[in-house]
Image: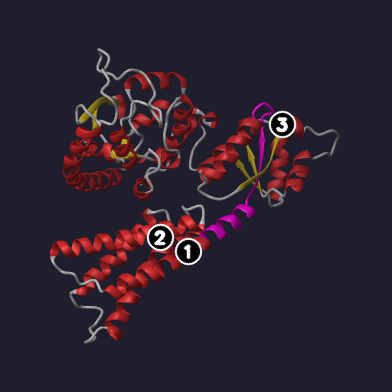
Amino acid sequence: MRRVAGLLTPLGSAALVGLLAWIHAAHLAVPAYPVLGTARTPWTVLLALTVAVAGYATGLPDGPATRRRALACSAAAVAGSLAVVSALQLVVGQPLLPRFVALGMVLVVPPWHLVCWNLAHDGAARSAARERVLLVAGSGEVGPLARELEADLAERAERPAQLVGAVGLDELAPSRPGDHPLARAVERTGATLVVLDLAAQGDAALVHDVTELHAAGTRVRTLSMFSEQWLGKLPVGELERVSMLFDIGELHHRPYVRARRLVDVVLASTGVVVLAVATPVVALGNLVANRGPLLYSQDRVGRDGRVFRMVKFRTMVPVAETPDGRAPSRWTAADDERVTPWGRILRRLHVDELPQVVAVLRGDLSVVGPRPEQPAYVEELRAKLPYYDVRHLVRPGLTGWAQVKYGYSGDESDAREKLQYEIFYLRHQHLGLDLRIVGRTLRHVLAAGGR
């Protein structure tokens, strides 16, 4: 139902614009005119496409948590679409958007968005109720794993499910011959899916019981498989070296490499235009609330461990670098006191990232990929996190799967969590996922959320 609602939201919005344009052309305009084949037609098509894209960008239908928020997102999408098309018409000197269509959009598109929002959320609730998960883990790990899994399902699930129980291996030891504690736990919780961590997978007796449950209709997943399919990440604690030998699009699929580079160049070229427009505005803001240099550059680690210089609009008070050209080794916090008032605005709107489009054109960055980290942090993290260097097999990106799924990274624990999403991205790297990440990033930017 969520997918259906996701399709109906843009298609229905565009169709409503077309319907309003037809009503005006055939029944209200004097004289009447054909809805197709006139100077108004391209503007109608542009408005329909714009409102469809704006609805997705604001998070509709499944992003808003409440009806009030959904209505606010819909109002923003409609108002933004009308503003963009009206501004373009003024620039080209063709004010051909009928007031009836504009007013009609305000009246009919938000109710349609609310219908789709209800479908998405009702469908998600029903899916979560149907997918009931029982976690089986090593006795010392069951509590932390259960809490992490519950939080991920509540906040970052790709497919809805609910955790209905968690049991440790010590609770599943048979008390007498013929006893099946796991079957009782499944029956007691009403679980439809049993998830096993590495310790549980190594228990031969438990695997035998799970096999019988599977044959009886209960689905079974390893924790790694469940995380990949339901959460969009691969837990590093569940991975082994051989499990990392998967195809990576940027390394093993030449057509993807060419298509990806083409998308990078097209989007970065558009970004250069935006950068040219934004630079005077940022410079003016600096004079008022961010005194100091306009730009800030810093060493970052790119593909194959190669260090490159990344340039951003400065958002913090000027900080001296260490003699080796690196910034002082200190994690940047989400509410860092070093961020200036103007810098906070730039960060919230992601304008500070714009100069990086030059690095995309140069080939140091891609639009989508793991975010590049400072050399000092890379040395620290590769010593503490298994498989950390895998992220350096591909070009880093302006945005990435970890950014849209997890957001801000402020310490080693966050870096570990984001690495799990980055490994998922490497395993599933393809153009469709890249475009999906770009779309979700646009949602984050318009909602002023995440970094």
Note whether 20 is above or below 114 in the view shown.
below
Instruction: Give the position of the C terminus as an image quadrant.
Output: top left
Front label number (3 vs 2): 2
Q: Which of the marked residues, 3 or 2, is nearer the chain's N terminus?
A: 2
Residue at the (64%, 34%) spot, across then down: 201
Note whether 374 is above or below 53 in the view shown.
above
Tag 3, which secondary structure?
helix
Residue at the (19%, 46%) spot, across then down: 269
Tag 1, which secondary structure?
helix
* Image position, residue 253 (x, y; %): 32, 43
Tag 2, which secondary structure?
helix
Residue at the (64%, 54%) spot, across then down: 129
Residue at the (69%, 48%) spot, across then down: 191
* Distance (Cα) linking label 3 and label 2: 49 Å
Q: Which mark is residue 198?
A: none
* Image position, residue 254 (x, y; %): 29, 43
Q: Mark 3 points at which residue?
A: 169
Q: Is residue 245 left or right of residue 252?
A: right
Q: Mark 2 points at which residue?
A: 74
Q: Which of the marked residues, 2 or 1, is nearer the chain's N terminus?
A: 2
Question: In which quadrant of the rendered view does residue 357 lie?
Answer: top left
**C-beta proximity under 8 Å, tags 2 and 1:** yes
Find out whether residue 365 is within the magenta segment: no
Q: Is residue 179 left or right of residue 193?
A: right
Q: Which mark is residue 114?
A: 1
Residue range in magenta is 120-142
Find out whether residue 137 is within the magenta segment: yes
Is residue 82 visible in this depiction of the protein? Answer: yes
Note whether 354 is above or below 411 in the view shown.
below
* Image position, residue 137 (x, y; %): 66, 33
